[in-house]
Amino acid sequence: MNLLKYLQAQGIDTRKGCQWLIKNGLVQINGETQTNEKAEVQPENVQTLTIEGEDAIVVPLPYFYILLNKPADYETSHKPRDYASVFTLLPDQVRAADIQAIGRLDADTTGVLLITNDGQFNHRMTSPKHKVAKVYRVTLKHPADEKLCRSLKNGVLLHDDNETVAAQEAVLRDEKTLVMTITEGKYHQVKRMVAAAGNRVEHLHRERFGQWDTQDLALGEWRFIKPENAA
């Protein structure tokens, strides 16, 4: 793509804004000043991007994938009602793209959240037929024993549902800490399953989604990832 389209795709500015930056010699790619808006740019070869003397994020194109360690009190929505949008944790340059979360986490739930502008990848990760595992650490209100784990693995009937839903795995780390793996994505599924099994969720943290965890990220931090089965 040409330089002008590249800068727009990077979320740097509007078309006119990008033209002004190029015309005034305020764009550098890999340390070289760019003054021709029609110059060809190979996105995969861009290591550094500098705008007006400041380093900009190099967003992978055409599709990108983000791993975010979601904190509490953020809504997984572009139009939140009660809390800030989780997307505000990302730079404006990234938010300029048509990004969506892959599934949702409740405002009070923390942990792994994947974000992308690749609709096909989003579908593959959330489609029930692909059975992508999601691992949750559940803090329980009441002490539990193996009976709770057996109930969850055998299947419980959710309120207002007509069929049972089972956990792929359910293990107690201690009497109030449950680690549960599911491969579906029903509304409030973990909370509803635990309630159906006779307990209550006090706090919920997603430890893993597919191959990704957030052990290297503090709450609120994010990084680009490269899924093997991405577009």
Image (spheres, rainbow, N blue to C red):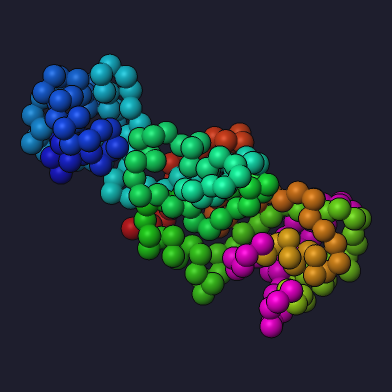
Report whether 223 appears left or right of 208. left
Nearer to the camera, 3 or 198: 198
User: Image point 37% across, 63% down: which residue?
Assistant: 120
Q: Is residue 43 magenta?
A: no
User: Image point 20% across, 29% down: which residue?
Assistant: 17
Report whether 178 appears left or right of 103. right
| Picture quadrant of residue 6 | top left
Q: Position of residue 199 (x, y in %)?
A: 85, 62
Furthest toward the bottom, the residue is: 162
Specify start and end residues of the magenta stretch as a single range.
159-188
User: Image point 55% across, 64% down: which residue?
Assistant: 132
Furthest toward the top, the residue is: 53
Q: Position of residue 64 (x, y in %)?
A: 37, 47
Q: Is residue 164 magenta?
A: yes
Q: Position of residue 164 (x, y in %)?
A: 71, 79
User: Image point 22% across, 35% down: which residue?
Assistant: 14
Q: Is residue 111 visible?
A: no
The image quadrant where one finds the C terminus is: bottom left
| Picture quadrant of residue 189 | bottom right
Report whether 25 appears left or right of 227. left
Report whether 178 appears left or right of 102. right
| Picture quadrant of residue 31 | top left
144 over 75 or under it: above or below: below
Q: Position of residue 113 (x, y in %)?
A: 55, 49
The image quadrant where one finds the N terminus is: top left
Q: Is residue 28 visible?
A: yes
74 over 22 or under it: above or below: below
